[in-house]
Amino acid sequence: MKLLIVSANFAPEPVGIGKYSGEMAEWLVAQGHEVRVVCAPPYYPTWRVDAAWRWPPYRHEVWRGVRVWRAPLWVPARPGGLKRVLHLASFALASLPSLLRQWAWRPEVVMVVAPALLCAPMGWLTARATGARAWLHVQDFEVDVALKMGLLRQGLLRRLALGVESWLLRRFDTVSTISGRMHEHLLRKGVSPERAQRFPNWADVQAVRPLRGASAYHAELGLPGGARVALFSGSWSAKQGLDTVVQAARALRHRPDIVFVVCGQGALQAELEAAARELSNLRLLPLQPLERLGELLGLADAHLLPQSVEAEDLVLPSKLTNMLASGRPVVATCRAGTELAEVVGHCGVVAPPGDPSALARAIEALMDDPARRETLGRRAREHAERHIDREAVLRTLESQLLAGQAGDATRVTP
């Protein structure tokens, strides 16, 4: 099989969508398939293109057997509504030459990973021009999230975004997404059941395992003996709800035995550094090497997974998979009845979103109950092994990719 992936984020991005796209491509190459990728230079989660990747603006590389073409994009220092749209539009335009050169290769499947949805038109056109199956994979419903967060306030812009999204969703042969609720949302948006598929994010349950002893990070951070760690690891951005975590740390500053560790990078770095100077129970860690992921996740006595109300059931946080694989309980902020609440409900604790006091109480109660933490952590690991094991998920994906190649009766015509 010849697969072309179009994704703004791609490995060696250490987190998020880039990580999953990279692992998928690497795994498929190992199974004997040909995989090419058109993507941007690494910029996430720092929202800054590293100096080593700024020139030349276009480059071709081979990464773990995957042929990768990188195209430039504009990265705003403070991403917001219109800036984020322009940011993604810049890659959609700049990637055109790289996509056009793939036409001669004639891929059998073209998979566009959204975000960025703005890359979908050219990905779809590439599929049609080469006779390939057009596949759109939705990691989050970026238009709906932008609308709920007030990033697309103007009536004309709102109608245009929804109209373009609807048109695109109806044009792709396959539209997949990562969770059950998001799959239902695809159907509500007009994607026919035979074209809508669920393709969940996964965890490498062999690489990420529950630690048997104390994490080396305890000593490296100089944590006091007996300290219990509430860990957040991910992008430092506004939509992550990190302000709630900081306020919960402030509410528990009288408990020196409960330490909040926030690991990652992102636009809120200055704000988090200011909070850490004020709060002795808040420690910051920069983004850690991928090979230390298991050690990092094992630092947690409980993982923190804040989520805004605006994003519920439109995004299932990708970081949840490795949290579960680490065999530690999760404290999530989400409303009852959401898919995140259903998953976390049997292997962690759910607190109302946007309520730092409730989050602090949930963390404190869990930290004071080691038996409950052990039970919930065991359930988290069992869920990862049964439902999101990387090998099983990617085997299923491979069969779906192969099943829809030549002569697909469900091929959508323009």
Image (tube, grey):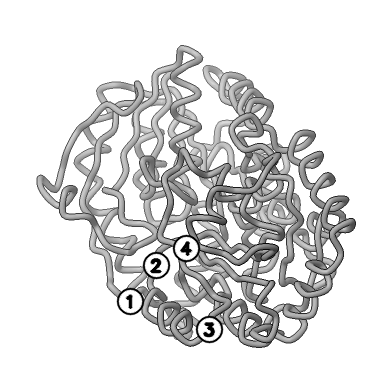
Q: For numbered disc 4, what is the local secondary structure?
A: strand
Between the C-alphas of marks 1 and 2, the distance is 10 Å
Residue 279 sits above or below residue 330 on the image? below
> Which of the two residues, 347 or 55, is positioned nearer the viewer here?
347
Residue 266 numbered tag: 2
The answer to whether marks 2 and 4 mark residues whose Cβ atoms lie closer than 8 Å is yes
> Where's residue 401, x and y in %?
57, 25
Q: CA distance from mark 1 to mark 4?
A: 14 Å
The image quadrant that residue 84 belongs to is bottom left
Asked whether, in this view, residue 314 is left or right of residue 163, the answer is right
Residue plotted at (83% across, 58% down): 342
Q: Which mark is residue 332?
A: none
In three-dimensional space, the C-alpha distance between marks 3 and 1, rounded to whole angstroms, equals: 25 Å
Q: Which residue is mark 4?
A: 235
| Image vertical order of residue 279 relative to residue 343, above or below | below
Q: Are marks 1 and 2 in contact (CB under 8 Å)?
A: no
The answer to whether the residue labelled 1 contacts the one labelled 4, judged by CB atoms less than 8 Å apart, is: no
Residue bearing the label numbered 1? 78
Residue with the mark numbered 3: 279
- Residue density around tag 2, few if under 14, some if 14–19, many if 20 or more, within 10 Å: many
Amino acid type of the residue tagged 4 in the rendering:
Ser
Q: Earlier in the sequence, mark 2 or mark 4?
A: 4
Sequence order check, earlier mark of 3 and 1: 1
Q: Quadrant for residue 268, please give it.
A: bottom left
Which is in the foreground here, disc 3 or disc 1? 3
72 lies above or below 353: above
Q: CA distance from mark 3 to mark 2?
A: 20 Å
